Image: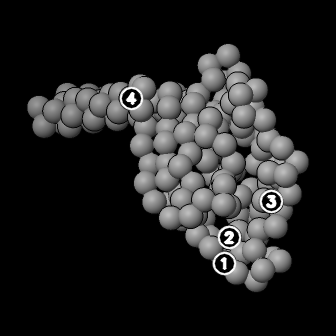
Amino acid sequence: MHRKSPTRRQRLRGTVATLAALALTALLAACTPNPAEKSLGETLKQYETIIRWSQWDAAADFLAPEYLLENPITRLDMDRLRLFKVTSYTLRSTGIFDNGLTARQEVEIRLFNKRQGIERAIIDEQEWRWDETRERWFLHSGLPDPTHRY
């Protein structure tokens, strides 16, 4: 049985398909985030969820150990936060710095004071830093401050 040899057009299609597959593979490899980039989105989403549910004790677990040494959280701070129920968490701005090792975001948080029956809005300026030894993001700006107004 005699097979026809591929025509020039068929060879060209095969070459183009191979080149397209190689280009797509290279593009996907270049788009794969490093662990810090991938982890940042997950960390920010977890933190947002915890804040939205007013789980202040769990939110404290995101604080950097170095930050806590310099700025310990007092019982008064936690009791003050427990007076508030979060009604809204709105991301205002975000930025990545220091070659992807620092992230800053500005968030508007609306808080309802359970004792006074009053809602207030605060701006929470968050600074997150990647810890390479622990391979996770830590918050270096503290928990939201309900006494701060904008």
Q: Estimate the spatial distance between the alpha carbons at disc 3 and disc 1, rounded to whole Å.
A: 14 Å
Where does the image place residue 32, in percent across and percent down from the top left? 47, 32
The residue tagged 4 is: 30
The answer to whether one can see residue 4 in this image is: no
Tag 4 or tag 2, which sits nearer the N-term?
A: 4
The residue at which mark 1 appears reads as: 119
Q: What amino acid is at disc 2?
A: Leu
- Quarter of the image for residue 38 reads top right
Quarter of the picture containing the N terminus is top left
**Labelled pair 2, 1 in contact (Cβ < 8 Å):** yes
Q: In the orientation shown, which residue stands out farthest toward the top?
A: 133
Q: Quadrant of residue 132?
A: top right
* Residue identified by numbered label 2: 111
Q: Residue at x 35, y 33 (%)?
A: 27
Q: Nearer the viewer, mark 3 or mark 2?
A: 3
Helix, strand or loop for disc 1: strand
Residue pointed to by mark 3: 80
